[in-house]
Image (spheres, rainbow, N blue to C red):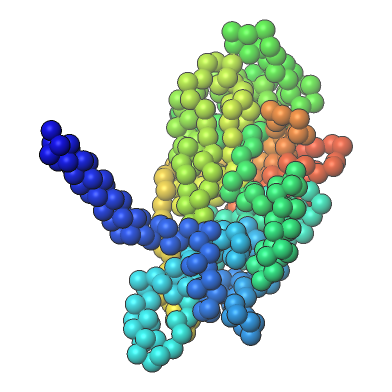
Amino acid sequence: MMSRQIRLIGGVLALLLVALLVNITVIQVVLARDYRERPGNQRILLAEYDRERGPILVGANPVAKSVETGNTLRYLRTYDDGPLYAPITGFYSLIYGATGLERTENRVLTGKSDLFFVDRISQLFAGRQPVGGAVTTTIDAAAQVAAFKGLKGKVGAVVAIEPTTGRILASVQSPSFDPNLLTSQVPETIRAYYEELKADPAKPLLNRPIVALNPPGSTFKLVTTAAALASGLYTPDSILPGPAFYRLPLSTSELQNWNRKECGPDGKVTLERALAISCNTAFAWLGVQLGDEALRRQAQLMGFDTSFQIPLKAATSRFPAELDAPQTALSAIGQFDVRATALQMAMVGAAIGNNGVTMEPYLVQEVRGPDLAILQTTEPTKFEAAMTPLHAAQLTEMMVNVVANGTGSNAQITGVQVAGKTGTAETDNDRPAVAWFVAFAPAQNPQVAVAVVIEESGATEITGNGLAAPIAREVIKAVLR
């Protein structure tokens, strides 16, 4: 009996030993890299503070770089124009780890990437301290500054994209934060500033351009128009009903136009004019005729329902599933449960401006070695063919008409043709309405598509033309200069 119990205990102990060995193997082999690169791993951070971390570049300008301190922590991370570039660089903190490109490109910046194998061997034999590589962003400094100035005093975001490539030319948020105050070598200062940022109801730590989801409002009418043209049933000259009020199908609820007026004589309006004056009732009716599947498919071709890594992870913009007729009507004008980031709506404008082709967005142009030799370059990648070139050209002309003769007049630039679309959307909480503007400059070189979203401004009248269009205009002008 005793020997049986000893064998049983021995068997249990053997199983526990096997489990322990398996656990150790998983931690030290399978999950080792994951544990090492966790943002809060202070042991790794302390070791990395002893080596020179590579810069993050905007053009030739290092907007994030390491400087020698002469202290125990040999290097300090510093940020030129910190709040301006915070949505891109993120921060590199002794206490809170890394965010933004500081996190996603950490292996490059620390020189641990496989791209630097030859450099590491050379440094080892020469007895030199390892030095990190450089990350060159796609950001256009002038566009970034223009967007930052335009957002001052507001809560919102701006994203600008080069339509033919998907290069992100600007990614700006307001309010922002100063990463320098999170990367000091005084823990008390870091913690105090971080807690202050966390307590701010405007959420300055939120990467608004790629994470904040808002109803896109009337800017989504671009997607609905694209779906209408793709159906083969509608052209820019098609006549739609545009009454002052539209009763939602299977409902007693009514939808109204922003000015509570009919959109044309006898309540009739062309598709082109409906877009120019942002006729809610016409587009709600049109959405029901097209059906939710057609709207969803068109939205997905332009990037909705896909999570993009630029390499920062963007929130997934969404077009809701399984809609009934009233929900489809509201979704066709960017309401109900339709949600989009500024990045997503910039992609919509860019796809139209790129002959109907949606490109994958990206933020890193090049990876460079410690000697700044180019080791890797990002190649533009096609995401989907969202429209035919003919339909994209038709929609472009309709958007030019929005700016020239419709609701987007504040985006006009002397001597430059601008295509745009305004948007105002009701939110599902106590926040004010959200104002949008999506625009691009066709037939220009360089090309740029811009999305501006204003969540809060303090303004009494909230319109896309009044709040967002002037910012888009200045960003376009900055790129064209």
Assign the N terminus to one quadrant of the image: top left
Give residue 54's position: percent from left, percent from top. Answer: 52, 76
Question: Residue 110 versus residue 325: which sits nearer the camera?
Answer: 110
**Quick one: 457 or 252, which is closer to the camera?**
457
**Quadrant of the image occupied by residue 280:** top right
Residue drawn at point x = 66 percent, y = 41 percent: 421
Left or right, 34 with respect to 421, comes to left
- Front-most of 273 and 107? 107
Tell me which residue sits at (12%, 39%) in the image.
3
Q: Is residue 391 above or below residue 294?
A: below
**Can residue 21 be seen in this snapshot?**
yes
Image coords of residue 49 (percent x, y): 55, 74
- Residue at figure coordinates x 47%, y 52% from the top left: 309
* Most distant residue in the bottom direction: 126
Q: Which residue reaches farthest front?
A: 2
Instruction: Please name the residue shown 26% across and 53% down the image.
Output: 21
Q: In the rendered view, would you say 141 is above or below 433?
A: below
Q: Position of residue 271 (x, y in %)?
A: 61, 29
The quarter holding residue 416 reads bottom right
Image position, residue 166 (x, y; %): 50, 56
For the C terminus, give its image quadrant: bottom right
Q: Is residue 443 visible?
A: no
Q: Is residue 159 above or below residue 324?
A: below
For the image, the number of numbered tags is 0
